[in-house]
Image (cartoon, coloured by chain):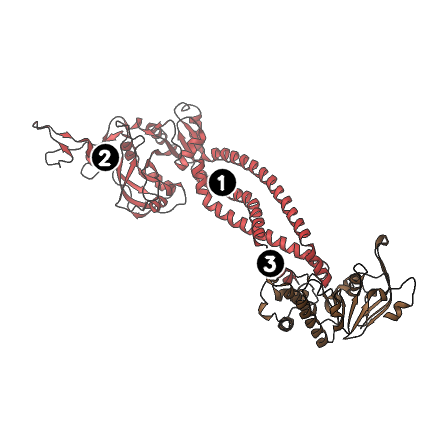
Amino acid sequence: MLRNVCYLAFRSLWWYRGRTAVIILCLAVTLGMPLSVRLLVGRFQEEIRRRAASTPLIIGARGSRIDLVLHGLYFASVTADFVTMGEADYVTQSGLATAIPLHVKFRTQSVGRSPGAPIVGTTLEYFDFRGLTVARGGTLSRLGDCLLGSAFAESSGLQPGDFLLSAPKNAFNLAGDYPLRMRVVGILAPSHSPDDEAVFTDIRTAWIIEGIGHGHQELSEESTEQLLDSDGTPGTLTANASVLPYTEITDENVASFHFHGDEADFPVSAFIAVPADRRSQTLLLGRYASVRRDAAVCVKPLEVVEELLAMVFRVEQVFRAAAVVSGSVTGLLFALIVFLNIQLRAPEMDTMQRIGSARGVTGMLVATETGIMLFLAAFLAVAAAAVISVLGEAWLKQWLF
Amino acid sequence: MITIRHLMFSRPHGEFAMNIPRLTVDRGESVVLTGPSGSGKTTLLDLAAGILQAESGSIIVDGQDLTAMTEPRRRSFRLRRIGLVFQSFELIEYLSVIDNVLLPARISPEVILDSELRSRAARLLECAGLDRLQRRSVTQLSQGEQQRVAVCRALLMEPTLLLADEPTGNLDPDNSRRIMDLLLDQVRRMNTTLLAVTHDHTMLSRFDRALKFQDLLVSEQNPAEADRAS
């Protein structure tokens, strides 16, 4: 009997397929939206908590704690103020923690399908700390080398041996940063984290991009005329401005690169502190709450992330309330449609009753049609929510950070 | 085959009342009722089908008294033993021709839609000249074709009694003749009793018996007249 009722219900739904599709779509959107948001927020929360939990402490310039943590975890939003490398040295020399500096100020130029990636200047400890391994090529061995995150490598199409240009912060600032042509030496294995989207260099390479360190080009008469201009005065050579579209560090000129000033004064945007133990962590937090209070701020990323998630949760609550209201309205409209459908099909129901249909068959028919539409809408909603939660996670992180 | 005795029925608020002392139609006999609109012919068919319940009296169809049955039993009995043909066809627009014919088998848990029923439906459509239109939507059929589908549906369960309410009321003369051919051929072949209502006097001669509906009713002036008429 149920089979026959289902058959009749399917025939009816197919006959009125335009109307059926609209109803299913409306129900799917009503069910799918809150579900998608829940799944998306759930995945986002899980991911951001995992990243935060794996990072014991982040130290950076005083300011927004949330900005500092998002910067340290996701290389997002350039911090307004930098701390110095001396602060990182202080932490390391205190014996309480290992300091891993991060210099995130510049991005690469767009390559392939990639609009560019943040250039993360750090030390080799960062790779050990995050458990990052090189999948192809080698590791950083010289100034000007860079390692690509797996996702960036895929979207840019770059391979070890290729070159990559940094993007200047300001194209008209001739006295400031200058594009650096970096050599791709390796590609990191996927880690399903923001590291996959970044380009890593040695921190001193990042300082060169910033203009703190530089090299000197050796000019000679043998250099090509395109590169040089001679005014005829013996012993005097003048460089042609057009010959320098970027800086490049090569095996030949690497020795000429140097830094002016004390490395302890060089900027880092933040650094990760990995305490030796819980006691060291408490002591370090205490120091930055007292004696080092004016120098920098030390935060536990998980605590800050929980604050951020509490805000997200409040936004989600508002969204949920709106979804309940719109869901109720859709529910009422759906009930109205079912009611009107029953009225519209009263002659058909009457014919079935007159022929001798069992009591309740017509009710079963309407209920089955309603059930099929709800089931299909729920299926669509769940499928769409699953797709959105996967695809939307990256978009949400990009949008938020 | 159908025997009505002392049948009394009235609508609420005294709008309509019917009193039929006696009506008998034999097995395989085709009887047509004529009479003015609103006289109660359709009501009589509804009572004979068990759709309406009489106040008193008996309606015996194939040896079973409909007035003594519960409502669910009457439904079941109607589905299995009584075929109905309506003036406005009453086909389900979202079903194909074959699915409309098979409808009685799809709306009752007591009937199993097996291959035998499917071949019977196909045979009926073949007899009605609709075998090539089995999968077509009924909305694509002409009125004559639609009524032929309705006749096939009424005959699917091989009913012992076929009730036809103005079966040619919406059709042109040519289609009316074809429908009557189909109806009478099938009921004679199946030895089914046919009780029809019509306004079309040109069709009366095709039935075994034609009765004036008023003659069946008890008249205040002449109570014995109805008995003689039936």
Left or right, residue A23 beside residue A282: right
> How many residues crowd around disc 2 within 10 Å: few (fewer than 14), some, or many (20 or more)?
few
Figure chain in brown: B
Q: Which mark is residue A245?
A: 2
Q: Which residue is mark 3?
A: A10
Task: Give the camera-side residue of B70 and B134.
Answer: B134
Q: Give the SS element for disc 3.
A: helix
Q: Earlier in the sequence, mark 2 or mark 1?
A: 1
Q: Chain of mark 2?
A: A
Marks 2/1 same chain = yes
Q: Amino acid at mark 2?
A: Pro
How many dots with numbers?
A: 3
Q: Are marks 3 and 1 in contact (CB under 8 Å)?
A: no
Measured Cα–Cα span from mark 2 to mark 1: 43 Å
Question: Residue B150 lies in what quarter of the image?
Answer: bottom right
Q: Is residue A200 visible?
A: yes
Figure chain in red: A
Task: Give the camera-side residue of B65 and B22.
Answer: B22
Q: Which residue is mark 1?
A: A45
Q: Chain of mark 3?
A: A
- Residue beneath the point at 25% across and 30% down: A213
Q: Are marks 2 and 3 in contact (CB under 8 Å)?
A: no
Q: Earlier in the sequence, mark 2 or mark 3?
A: 3
Q: Quadrant of the C terminus of chain A?
A: top left
Q: Are marks 2 and 1 in contact (CB under 8 Å)?
A: no
Q: Chain of mark 1?
A: A
Q: Earlier in the sequence, mark 3 or mark 1?
A: 3
Q: Amino acid at mark 3?
A: Phe
